[in-house]
Every structure is written in structure tokens, then in C-alpha cells.
């Protein structure tokens, strides 16, 4: 997964106006818990397997880089 994967997934859930350079998407309120759930669904659809519950914590969704790193850890860099 790379930056584009994370951005693509955010677009999938209707967040195409998000500040991709923001380091604090959750703290700033750009993403809320409903967005995270939608994102998890989008991730699971894209990778065709479920995201381990251990990964579903706010710090993994705080910025594009964090999402990208989580995807690489969760799915071994595929996609």
C-alpha cells in the first residue's frame, strides 16, 4: 500500500476533500468514528479480507502515512 492507496480509500468513503497533508485527521475532526468504520469497510473490500481488530485504533487513522503503514502491516504491502 502506498500514499495513493490511502487517498483512494478516503475518496471511496466520500472524503475526497480531506487535507492529505494533515498529521491529525482525527484530532482535527476531519475523520470521526463513523468515517473510521466506513474506511475499515472500504479497506476490507479492497483487500478482500478482514482487517484485524488490533489495527482498528485511532492512531492508525490519524494521517495518510499512518493509514499506509497500517495497511502494510496488516496486509503485507500488497495492493
Image (cartoon, rainbow, N blue to C red):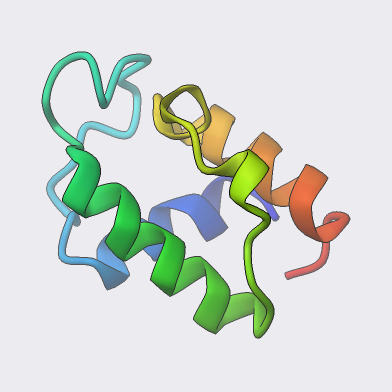
Q: Is residue 69 above or below residue 8?
A: above
Along the viewing direction, whichever of 35 and 52 lies nearer the viewer:
52
**Residue in the picture at 48% in, 22% down:** 59
Residue closer to the observer: 44 or 69: 44
Displayed quadrant of residue 20: top left
* Residue that sits furthest to the right in the current view: 76
Image quarter (top left, top right, bottom left or bottom right) of the C terminus: bottom right
Residue 4 x, y percent position in the rendering: 52, 55
Give above or below for 2 relative to 75.
above
30 displayed left or right of 12: left
Q: 21 and 35: which one is in front? A: 35
Residue 50 higher or lower than 19, as above or below:
below
- Can you tell which quarter of the image residue 77 is in? bottom right
**Residue 21 percent coordinates (x, y):** 34, 24
Q: Quadrant of residue 27?
A: top left
Please state if 9 lies on the left or on the right of 77 as rendered: left
* x and y, in percent, of residue 44 in the image: 55, 74
Is residue 45 shown above or below 9? below
Q: Position of residue 23 (x, y in %)?
A: 37, 15
Amino acid at each position: 500500500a502506498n500514499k495513493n492507496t490511502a487517498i483512494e480509500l478516503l475518496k471511496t468513503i466520500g472524503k475526497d476533500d480531506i487535507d492529505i497533508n494533515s498529521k491529525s485527521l482525527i484530532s482535527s475532526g476531519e475523520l470521526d468514528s463513523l468515517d473510521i468504520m466506513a474506511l475499515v469497510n472500504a479497506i476490507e473490500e479492497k483487500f478482500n479480507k478482514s482487517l484485524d481488530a488490533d489495527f482498528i485504533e485511532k492512531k492508525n487513522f490519524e494521517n495518510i502515512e499512518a493509514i499506509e503503514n497500517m495497511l502494510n502491516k496488516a496486509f503485507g504491502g500488497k495492493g
